[in-house]
Image: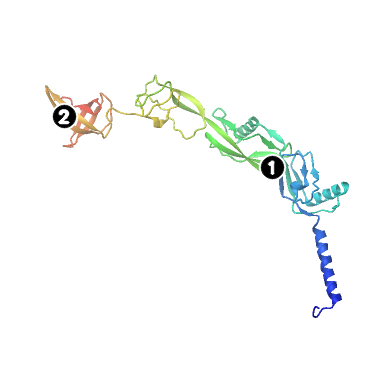
Amino acid sequence: MFRGFTIPFFLYVCLSLSFGLGADTNQGAGRVYLKPKLVTSKTEVRASEILNWKSAWNPVLYSNLKSPLIVEPDEVSAKLSELAKKENQSQTDWDVRGTSSTIIPLTEEWDGKEIESYLVSYLEKEADLDRSRFRFQYQGESLSLPVTGVELQWRKVGKNLHGGKRLFPLDLFHNGKLIHSVSLGFVIDEKKEAWFTKHHIESKHIITSEDVEKRSFFTSDNTKDYDLNSPVGKTALNAILESTPIEKKQLRLLHTVERGGEVQLVYTVGNIMIKAKTRALESGNEGDEISLMNVTSNKILKGKIQSPGICLLEEGR
């Protein structure tokens, strides 16, 4: 039937292959691999949580965990075998492969106030934080950490603090080794000063001392530019609501006559009025004397501002 082979020899080969495959199958039946890390919110760990587990039997390997635990493959293998024999499982020999696994039980809850206080204490020490100038509001849910066995370290944040949203990374060290990190979000309120409106300000209104007052306030908005110089005499470019901090861009010091604008220069002698078209070389308000250039002769003249666009050339000029 098979040229070159006898029947006994063919049966021998088949039986050898059969036994060989069976041996390999049995050898791998109890082989599992250890995961490098487990972060859990529970105090107990089952086999399926740290191993690539296939069995329906899923024993608790560790319980009442309060601090990080580093486990080795041999340790887990021995524990599995011990539990299997104790619970009369069919598979009692387990071959655990891989490197060590770090189990991190996050079971102690910190509320927002505790987290804020912990950050502020760090910043006072490491970043010379002035607590009167800044306030911190934690934006996340409650934070869970191991009960014991970890050293908490905020990552370097520098000393350039300002209002706004910011993430602060918190590192967890166990036996001097970094094992876990979380990034925590905060809103930072910074204390600033600004001029506030006492009442509603209409557009084009010239600000007086009765319209405004200087106040200090906390804000997380770091994009607005407030002018600390007195706004009195400046003009509101648009309407401003009551009790609103005034931004620099909302006001402008407007003049009755603006530099570069066209001005009609008027000169009167008795009943005779002479008008000339000029251009203002300076800005000024009513009553100010400014330099003007005659657009026809380019001669420089002096005129006193009477009203918008009108200057008077006094006698003798």
Judging from the image, what secondary structure is the residue with disc 1 in?
strand
* Residue farthest to the top, as pictured: 210
- The quarter of the displayed image where residue 242 is located: top left
Q: Nearer the viewer, mark 2 or mark 1?
A: 2
Q: Is residue 192 above or below residue 35?
A: above
Residue 173 image label: 1
Q: Position of residue 64 (x, y in %)?
A: 79, 38
Q: Which residue is mark 2?
A: 275
Q: Position of residue 211 (x, y in %)?
A: 40, 21
Q: Is residue 27 above or below residue 169?
A: below
Using the image as rendered, state which of residue 143 and residue 51 is in the foreground. 51
Q: Quadrant of the N terminus?
A: bottom right
Task: Check disc 1: other Cα within 10 Å, few if <14, some if 14-19, many if 20+.
Answer: some
- The quarter of the displayed image where residue 103 is located: top right
Q: CA distance from mark 2 to mark 1?
A: 85 Å
Task: Check disc 2: other Cα within 10 Å, few if <14, some if 14-19, many if 20+.
Answer: some
Residue 271 placement, left or right of 4: left
Q: Position of residue 205 (x, y in %)?
A: 35, 24
- Residue drawn at x 83%, y 72% is 13
- The quarter of the displayed image where residue 65 is located: top right
Q: Position of residue 298 (x, y in %)?
A: 18, 37
Judging from the image, what secondary structure is the residue with disc 2 in?
strand
* Residue farthest to the bottom, as pictured: 4
- Residue drawn at x 82%, y 63% is 22
Q: Amino acid at mark 1?
A: Phe
Q: Amino acid at mark 2?
A: Lys
